[in-house]
Amino acid sequence: MTDLHSIRTAGHKDVPHGTKLELRLGRLPSTVTIRIQLPGQRDWTEYPDLLIKDGVLLLPVPIVFLCHAKEDQLVVQDFSKRLHQDGILTWLDEKNLLPGHDWKIEIDNELIIQTSFLFFCRRLAVKRLDISRGRFGMRLNNSKCVPKVRGS
């Protein structure tokens, strides 16, 4: 029997407050089957036979870093809510940056950890921002870009 000491999400993040979890023993040794419902999510998602390693259960809940210009904040927040309903957590600066934190360091750290990255921009924002340098440029250069044009 394996002891379970903590449950974390991708990138070893805390499980969001208000998340509902149901656990039962998995079919394989040192595993559990888990049903999860994120806060505000209508449906439950089941993950069978997740391995408990060193007392830690890592939930395979995807987390997407959402990058946007201030002008697109409302559109991106709405998109984040829709992803959340599909069981996908999001990282948004206005939601995840805490007062007193160095935003450049926090964003750099998140860009390293996150496996998915969505960049929202308008023509005006591209002209205003220099996205070719630093971690943003690195992520964009090493990512598959799927353009979605809607408005300007």
Image (spheres, grey):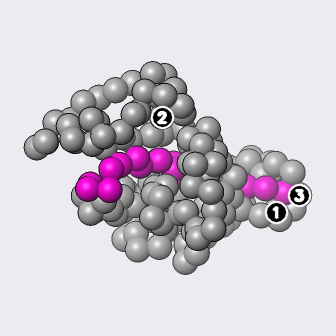
Classify 10 Å Cα crowding around label 1: few (below 14), some (14-19), many (20 and above): some
Disc 1 marks which residue?
A: 4
Helix, strand or loop at label 3? It is loop
> Closer to the N terminus: mark 1 or mark 2?
1
Amino acid of disc 2? Phe
| Front tag of 1 and 2 | 2
Q: Is residue 63 left or right of residue 78?
A: right
Question: Looking at this rendering, what residue extends furthest in the top direction?
Answer: 141
Q: Who comes first in sequence, dot 2 or dot 3?
A: 3
Task: Name the quarter where the N terminus is drawn.
Answer: bottom right
Decide which of 15, 134 is in the foreground and name it.
Answer: 134
List the residue tagged with mark 2: 136
Residue at left offset 35%, top offset 49%:
68
Q: Compared with residue 151, is residue 80 higher up or lower down, i.e. above or below?
A: below
Say above or below: 114 vs 61: above
Element carrying mark 2: helix
